[in-house]
Amino acid sequence: MRIITEDLITKPTGTAKIMATNTLSSYSYLLIGSGRVARHLAHYFHLLNIRHQSWDRSQDPHLLKPKVLASSHVLLAISDSALQGFYRQHLAGLEKTVIHFSGAHNFEDMIAAHPLMTFGPELYDLEFYQKIHFTMTGASLSEALPGLPNPSSILPAELKALYHAHCVLGGNFTTLLVGKMLSGFAEMNIPAEAARIYIEKVIGNVFADPSKALTGPLVRKDVETVKANLQSLKNDPYTEIYQAFLKTYWPEYPRK
């Protein structure tokens, strides 16, 4: 892929060189996709008054090519498994800056810009969008997505899978665990607000000092409480989750 440039950004070993520009005075985005990431990015661009078009599979396929040709930057907010195929079919050989948003994968001839954020059904306000950190591979944020004022960092391609694994552990798995807590509390008529106050303080303590934030029976090495916890969960799939954390943090726990 050729991209008009004055600066050369070299990808890590084993990937192609990508050229991107931070001197582009006029740019136009084409946003491909219709999922949550695409919706939020389109709204963010609107709030920033950044010129952009959009296209997804629900639209006339004949509209895609002229929109691509009219854009300087093509943003692929589609599933990871579709990225390479879409690029090869519609974008290969064109003088376009192509950006994808996969946190785990890296592809030749495309820049990776992973927004470190969860995107819910409700849109956010401008101040919040501007705080989202972008983890970049292949170019800096200013070169890949001119006009965005967000904080960012550069990540080597070979670390992307590990980086994304940490995102899933800290974000997605936390969501599952808190959701499990809320559903259990609801069955016992314990209000969600009580859980919210508790979880917010837990997260606050982690960011204040992660080495001292953990509390509970694992820290106290409380064998009887852990035994009671596991017994109460004996018919629940989350028993294995509890045991996995127990094995990780307290491998000496007497299992018999």
Image (cartoon, helix red, strand yellow):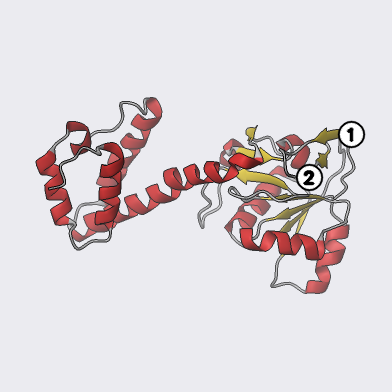
Residue at 66% across, 44% down: 113
Please, what secondary structure does the residue beneath circle 1 have?
loop
Give the CA separation, mark 2 to mark 1.
Answer: 17 Å
User: As drawn, is 112 to the left or to the right of 218?
Assistant: right
Residue holding disc 2: 16
| Between discs 2 and 1, the one toward the N terminus | 1
Q: Is residue 158 visible?
A: yes
State which mark lies toward you, 2 or 1.
Answer: 2
Kind of residue sitting beneath label 2: Ala
Q: Where residue 1 appears, x then y in whole percent?
A: 85, 50
Give the x, y percent position of residue 40: 61, 52
Q: Position of residue 145 (x, y in %)?
A: 74, 42
Q: Residue at x 81, y 66 (%)?
A: 64
To which residue does mark 1 refer? 6
Q: Is residue 146 visible?
A: no
Q: Compared with residue 97, is residue 63 higher up or lower down, i.e. above or below?
A: below
Q: Is residue 26 left or right of residue 55?
A: right
Q: Position of residue 70 (x, y in %)?
A: 87, 57
Q: Residue placed at 87% from the left, 64% from the top? A: 66
